[in-house]
Amino acid sequence: MGADRPPGNSPPATLGGNGLAVSPEFSITTRDLPDLHIVGLHGELDVVSADGLTDVLVEIAGSTLVVDLSGLTFIDSSGIAALVLARNRIRANGQGQLMLSRPGGIVRMALEIVGLGPWIVEWSAAWDD
């Protein structure tokens, strides 16, 4: 962390080359399969890291978009809002659908509390590397 940045204030994650977005607490990986895009979210999805996530997901969409939440350790209302906005924009633009898969305990609980449980789908073995 830079000396000019107060502790706890991290820069937002940004999409870089090779389908990776990286910050100290959050990263995004992407993988393309036939008629399917898989986006892996890793770390903490919060007010800092959620900035720009909607745009990244909408840009990747074009068919089915599966957001793999297995690497996510935390999500707050900003992260949930980014996922909801992305799904709404993808559907409104006719770009396919956004589904969530493999959320861990606390992430699953947060999604279910806000009513996003129906968005969660079982992981398919065909999606593995």
Image (tube, rainbow, N blue to C red):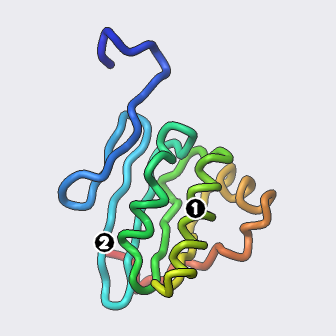
**Vertically, is 94 above or below 73?**
below
Q: Is residue 94 above or below residue 101?
A: below
Image quarter of the C terminus: bottom left
The residue furthest front is 93
Tag 2: amino acid: Arg
Residue plotted at (46% across, 77% down): 65
Residue visible at 54% across and 66% down in the picture: 86
The disc labelled 1 sits on which kind of residue? Leu
Quarter assignment of residue 47 = top right
* In front of the other: 78 or 26: 78
The residue beneath circle 2 is 31
Outermost residue on the bottom side: it is: 35
- Residue drawn at 65 percent across, 44 percent down: 76
27 vs 123, nearest the viewer: 27
Instruction: Describe the element under mark 2 as helix, strand or loop.
Output: strand
Q: Which mark is residue 83?
A: 1
Give residue 71's position: percent from left, percent from top: 47, 54
